[in-house]
Image (cartoon, grey):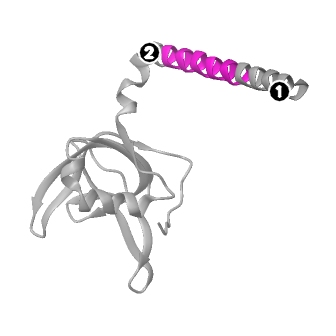
């Protein structure tokens, strides 16, 4: 009989601890959501930005090219090198290619201001639009911001 009472007390205490933890997490969740609401004026635009990260740069760029209709009209933010090619400007990273490390991955960027010189490290923020090119449809980022950064990320990426 004592074993049953101890088991019952153990279950009761365990349930109380679990209930307390659940209530604490719910309280923290509520505080976080209230704090997020307070910061809406600052972060509302940045929550809907698709950020291309350094570790998955090639995969994320490829996904934009493959599924460009899903990205059209979305704001994107990424860093890379300025690469001027003819009248076009790109923000790119160097990648493995057919003959070693001679590949590039990135997106064409457009705006109404002068572009920076090649190999400047920049952060690009803009809206993706699809344009018809000679080679077919391509995503192009219409910039809202192009900022030169002092701290560089990885020029060469493999993923």
Q: Is residue 40 above or below residue 69?
A: above
Vertical order, 87 against 148 (above or below) = below
Residue linked to disc 2: 37
Residue 95, visible in the rendered structure: yes
Whichever of labels 2 and 1 marks the residue nearer the N terminus, that label is 1
Residue at position x 24%, y 57% in the image? 67
Residue pushed farthest right? 2
Q: Is residue 27 left or right of residue 48?
A: right
- State which region is magenta: 17-35
Do the residues under discs 2 and 1 have CB atoms within 8 angstroms?
no
Q: Mark 1 — residue?
A: 4
Residue 58 at what x, y percent from top left?
A: 40, 64
Mark 2: secondary structure:
helix
Residue in the picture at 54% in, 53% down: 152
Main secondary structure along the magenta-highlighted residues = helix
| Drawn side of residue 135 relative to residue 78, left or right | left
Q: In the rendered picture of this protein, how many numbered marks are placed on residues?
A: 2
Left or right placement of residue 36 versus residue 129 in this view? right
Q: Position of residue 108 (x, y in %)?
A: 26, 56
Q: Position of residue 84 (x, y in %)?
A: 30, 61
Q: Residue at x 46, y 59 (%)?
A: 56
Is residue 119 or residue 74 the one in the foreground? Answer: 74
**Neighbour tally class for label 2: few under 14, some 14-19, many 20 plus, Cα within 10 Å:** few
Q: Could you tell me which quadrant the N terminus lies in? A: top right
Query: Which mark lies nearer to you, 2 or 1?
Result: 1
Magenta stretch encompasses residue 34: yes
User: Label 1 crowding class (10 Å Cα cut-off): few <14, some 14-19, many 20+?
Assistant: few
**Residue name at image x 81 percent, y 28 percent:** 7
Percent of width and height locating residue 61: 34, 59
Residue 20 part of the magenta segment: yes
Q: Nearer the viewer, residue 150 or 109?
A: 109
């Amino acid at each position: 009989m004592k074993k049953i009472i101890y088991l019952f007390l153990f279950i009761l205490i365990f349930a109380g601890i679990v209930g307390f933890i659940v209530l604490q997490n719910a309280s923290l969740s509520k505080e976080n959501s209230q704090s997020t609401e307070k910061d809406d004026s600052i972060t509302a635009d940045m929550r809907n930005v698709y950020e291309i990260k350094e570790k998955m740069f090639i995969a994320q760029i490829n996904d934009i090219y493959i599924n460009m209709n899903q990205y059209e009209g979305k704001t994107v933010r990424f860093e890379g090198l300025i690469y001027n090619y003819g009248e076009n400007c790109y923000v790119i990273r160097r990648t493995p290619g057919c003959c070693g490390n001679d590949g590039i991955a990135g997106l064409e960027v457009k705006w109404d201001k002068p572009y920076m010189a090649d190999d400047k490290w920049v952060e690009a923020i803009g809206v993706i639009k699809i344009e018809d090119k000679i080679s077919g449809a391509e995503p192009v980022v219409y910039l809202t911001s192009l900022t030169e950064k002092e701290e560089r990320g990885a020029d060469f990426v493999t993923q």
